[in-house]
Amino acid sequence: MKQHGITAPLTVLLADVQPAVRQGVRSMVEATGAAAAVVGEAGTTGEVLATASRYRPDVLVLDPQMDDSTGMRVISQVLRLAPETGVLVFSTLDDDKAVAAAFHAGARGYLVKRATADQIVRGIHAVGAGEAILDRTIAARLGTLIGTGPRPRSYPFPQLSDREREVLEHLAAGRSNSAIARELALASKTVSNRISHILGKLGVADRAQALVLARDAGLGQAAAAR
């Protein structure tokens, strides 16, 4: 984030029922110096919603399994109050259903609590930059995670919106963000955001994996021919 040519620190909200976990992540964030700053902590769903609404942080590091939590729905509740906040789930749960539920609710990233300090800090900054991030062990075992139920024959990824499908088609053709922006008459930032959402919904860690997945499904040929 920049203000008047000066790089502002990434603002981070920590939400976990365990104070020790919050303190540990706070120490990791503060060790980065001026690159990021913790603006608040929360230990209940109510505190998460109130604090997110008050500070509207760049990143919310969240363990949704709180004493009063309704599960991953807290993510969508936060995003209704602070839609620009990027949610990074930091949880002990690493089963596919939990990961799918988090991304369906709007999370940009998912790390398991065995992650190293470096992975956590990188995850926070990736989510703050609008990118998607997924725990390596989860990414390694998934081909595609989101929308694994019956799919219409007409399109292989029914979880994507029409606009996201357009972007994925061009991504599969090997086009850069700037080329996609020109083709679809969109701002580069809009394209970047849509690609982040696509990565999350497809359950892949980066655009290279998304490209392979899309090409394996037969996408990209029409866009490449134009």
Image (cartoon, rainbow, N blue to C red):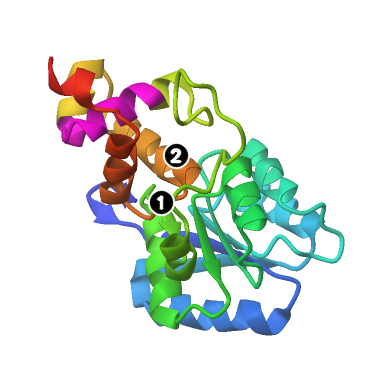
Q: Are marks 1 and 2 in contact (CB under 8 Å)?
A: no
Name the magenta segment's main secondary structure: helix
Amino acid type, callout 1: Val
User: Residue 5: which disc?
Assistant: none
Position in image of residue 69 (x %, y %): 82, 57
Position in image of residue 29 (x %, y %): 46, 75
Amino acid type, callout 2: His
Q: Is residue 132 above or below residue 168?
A: below
Position in image of residue 124 (x %, y %): 44, 63
Residue marked by disc 2: 197
> Of helix, strand and loop, which one carries label 2?
helix
Task: Report if residue 192 is visible in the image.
Answer: no
> Of helix, strand and loop, which one carries label 1?
loop
- Which residue is at 53% across, 47% downward? 85
Q: Is residue 38 above or below residue 115?
A: above
Position in image of residue 187 (x %, y %): 27, 25
- Which residue is at 70% across, 70% downward? 16
Q: Nearer the viewer, residue 106 or 148?
A: 148
- Which residue is at 45% across, 72% downward? 120
Residue 158 within the segment the image draws in magenta? no
Q: Which range of residues does the magenta coloring cover?
A: 165-178
Left or right of 98, for residue 168: left
- Which residue is at 41% across, 74% downward? 119
Residue marked by disc 1: 204
Q: Earlier in the sequence, mark 1 or mark 2?
A: 2
Choose mark 1 or mark 2, whichever is in front. 1
